[in-house]
Amino acid sequence: MPLEKEIYGEDAMTAFGAALSIGLKSGGVVYLDGDLGMGKTTLVRGVLRGLGYEGPVKSPTYTLVEPYEFGDFEVFHFDLYRLKDPEELEYMGIRDYFTAQGLCLIEWAEMGDGVLPEPDLVVSLNRVTDGRCVSIAAHSQTGEKALAMIKGTIPA
């Protein structure tokens, strides 16, 4: 069963992302679904803050991927919005990013259909009145474990 939460404001989205990080510390593949301006990068900033990263977090719209290192654990933030053809991902060595010691957070994953691995979690962001409705659904056993941990950290 998916987790749903209404979020109001950028600070609340960052805090929500930090809470999500609890379930993402063992890695996986997370698709971030939502229109432009829904707060996907803000959510990623929160996840990174929750993992202990204090530097700037920018959208990888033009670079396609931004890496973040935490010792033996790596986080890769992808933004595939400007991708013209999923085949471009093969040229950048996309498969090398998906390791057991890594977390891949992917915006606009549909642009990589047929090349990207299936997600463990899908986080969908949709507009509601003055805020966002965030829905998190598990799509694998790894995702189920992460979602169970996340549910334990998110207040009702």
Image (cartoon, rainbow, N blue to C red):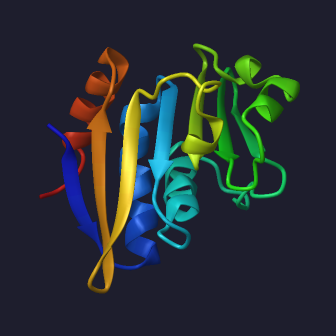
The front one of 76 and 46 is: 76
Vertical side of 128 occupied by 136: above or below: above
Residue 106 coordinates in the image, percent (x, y): 58, 42
- Give me the residue at 76% from left, 45% from top: 66
Report the residue that reaches farthest toward the right: 91
Vertical side of 86 occupied by 82: above or below: below
Q: Quadrant of the image for the N terminus?
A: top left
Query: In the visual, does 68 lie left or right of 156?
Result: right
The front one of 46 and 114 is: 114
Query: In the visual, does 31 lie left or right of 142?
Result: right
* Residue 95 sits in quarter: top right
- Give me the residue at 58% from left, 60% from top: 41
Report the residue that reaches farthest toward the bottom: 130
Residue 134 coordinates in the image, percent (x, y): 31, 59
Residue 85 coordinates in the image, percent (x, y): 76, 40
Question: How many badges with numbers are in the image?
Answer: 0
Vertical side of 37 occupied by 99: above or below: above
The front one of 101 and 137 is: 137
Q: Quadrant of the image for the C terminus?
A: bottom left
- Give me the residue at 49% from left, 66% from top: 35
